[in-house]
Amino acid sequence: MNESFRRALLRGLAFRRRLGGRSLALFALFSMASLPGWSQDWPQWGRTPQHTGVVNVSGQHARKLLDDVVYDPFVDAEKADPTFGAGDLHVHYQVPLTDGDDVYMEFKSGVYTSIENWNTQTWNEKKLRRVHGHLSEAWSFESDWKPVPFLSLLTGNGPFVEPVFHAVLVGNSVYVPGFGGSIFKVAKSDGHLVARINPFGSTLDPDTYVAGPLSADAAGNVYYNVLKLDHDNPWDVNPPASYLVKVSPNNTAKTATVASLTPGTPGAGDKCRGIFRIADLPWPPSPDAVPSPRTCGVQRVPVSSAPAIAPDGTIYIVTTAHLWIFEGYLVAVNPDLTPKWTASLANRFTDGCNVTLPPNGSPGGCRAGTPTGIDPWQNRNGSGMVIDDSTSVPVVLPDGSVLYGAYSIYPYLQGHLMKFSSSGQFLASYPFGWDDTPAVYPHDGTYSIITKDNHYSVGAYCNIPSSPFCPQDRTATNPASPEAFFITRLNSNLEPEWHFQSTNTQSCSRDAQGHVSCVSDHPAGFEWCVNAPAVDHNGNVFVNSEDGGLYAIRPNGSLRDHLFLDLAIGAAYTPLSIARDGRILTQNDGHLFVVGDDEDDD
């Protein structure tokens, strides 16, 4: 079975549970030309407070593996876990953070038991210093942070991919997620604890979790999401609260509940538009059919997303209804943590039936007579979803508008990239957004957006093997849109400027002696397994592929470099970064790799 297809089916399995079993699932401010040397480092997810993923240095050529450090000793056990079928690494990892010659990275210790009990592991932040061409441990800080519980096997609510543990570098400190909604302020110099900051009082609540990466603004304030869950039934009972937290450089903390930031959104017992039943396939049952309503649940933060901070101090987060993933929001927050605006992700897309899906009345298409463009699940415009297995974060663009990579079941489980104005108006979308934090390259008075663009081999909008309406192979049902995998550069209106296609067909692995062996078994290429690409100041794009390689793509969309790392398939979706000397820090199969074209000059 094709690996991307198998992954898509696993997502479908989780979404079937989530949906209750009744239907199938799963410019000047931005210019970096005059910034000092320290600002060329990579201190957080997406590098900048706006998460744009671009740096003002030239990325080195990907010609050599300059170093290889194992940060996750449990990879073999994680991939062998049978919960969702062995072979894949269902883990999200931190981006390697850089500070001159120093690299900060998460490392795991403790004991791995199962994906359903991932909190027996221990998460550490380590400082690695480059000495004579290799990264050596300078210090290690053990955190007591634990991820939120594994998903509910009854309904599928919650995550089935291990949530991300993610620090942030600020001045002379590294801030590290901790237990009970707290964070640690650790000295960069020697790793000693400067302060433990608990915004929720003197006690640490085991049901309160730091959820997603920490972010920091240019003034040194740290922002993060917190989720407090019901102890006995975390995913099927409305959570007591979730929060946006702001920590000032003097260690004082301010919190705002998501409830206070999302006035006017559906509440705990309110009803939202539901979806149709499997028995009603092909959807919609009739041109004017309306599905039965579903209980929404309260709005809360997702478990692996981070706040973004605009140059004017506006903070952007995303939220989701706890009991119904079709009801999510982009939320703008004032610097004092008061609400600014909320923008619904629902009822936005017009590219469904007869557009990105096969023709109405054909296999994989909507029911004959369905209005063009609607989402067959709900018989209205399509909706972006904020899901717990995605690391997508808001991205603030040079013109002040905001991107978010949302999930959507049609077309082909690809999601949508959504663009909103700085005042909350929906502006545009592009039909890929799954687990994606796009990078942004400013140039020539405008900017371009770089996104992965995986066209999965999976049913158009449903995945029931026995159903004649839901064929699983898109190439059989929609020859005009075959299985294929691209890195795509978009203009500021989300219109394609170029596509770079994965054409490598070979799965490779490296043995203990460093010998690489390959077999040609992926005729459609490999999906791009980067969840946050990196771009250098020339516009070269650096991304990871599921074929186990690091790719550098020129600004015109042609291949510059390709270097095999360690293993094809099952190596997890990972971010990467560019150090100030242009070396690339990337990940594959639980290894941190340093890639470049130079030798150490120490």
Image (cartoon, rainbow, N blue to C red):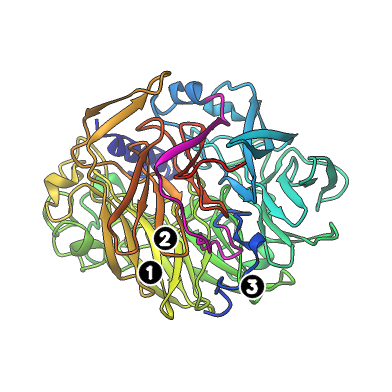
Task: Give above or below for 503 relative to 445.
Answer: above
Q: On the image, numbered disc 3 is attached to which residue?
A: 314
| Residue 50 painted magenta | yes
Residue 91 lies, in percent from the top left, at 51, 36
Which secondary structure dominates the residues rendered in magenta?
Answer: loop
Distance between the alpha carbons at the discs numbered 3 and 1: 24 Å
Q: Are marks 1 and 2 in contact (CB under 8 Å)?
A: yes
Task: In this rendered view, identify the residue nearer to me: 356 or 306.
Answer: 306
Residue 388 lies, in percent from the top left, at 52, 47
Q: What is the crowding at mark 3: few (fewer than 14 residues within 10 Å), some, or many (at least 20)?
A: some
48 horizontally vs 438: left or right: right
Residue 500 lies, in percent from the top left, at 27, 55
The magenta stretch is 47-74
Q: Is residue 286 visible?
A: no
Q: Residue at the location (32% across, 59% down)? A: 488
Residue 152 numbered mark, or none: none
Mark 1 / mark 2, whichever is N-terminal? 1
Q: On the image, numbered disc 2 is attached to which residue?
A: 384
Q: Quadrant of the C terminus?
A: top right
Q: Secondary structure at mark 2?
A: loop
Task: Give above or below for 589 relative to 261.
Answer: above
Task: Give above or below for 318 relative to 460.
Answer: below
Residue 485 lies, in percent from the top left, at 27, 49
Q: Residue furthest right?
A: 202
Mark 3 / mark 1, whichever is N-terminal? 3
Q: Secondary structure at mark 1?
A: loop
Task: In this rendered view, identify the residue nearer to me: 369 or 147.
Answer: 147
Q: Residue at the location (37% across, 55% down)? A: 408
Q: Quadrant of the N terminus?
A: top left
Q: On the image, numbered disc 1 is attached to which residue?
A: 348
Mark 3 / mark 2, whichever is N-terminal? 3
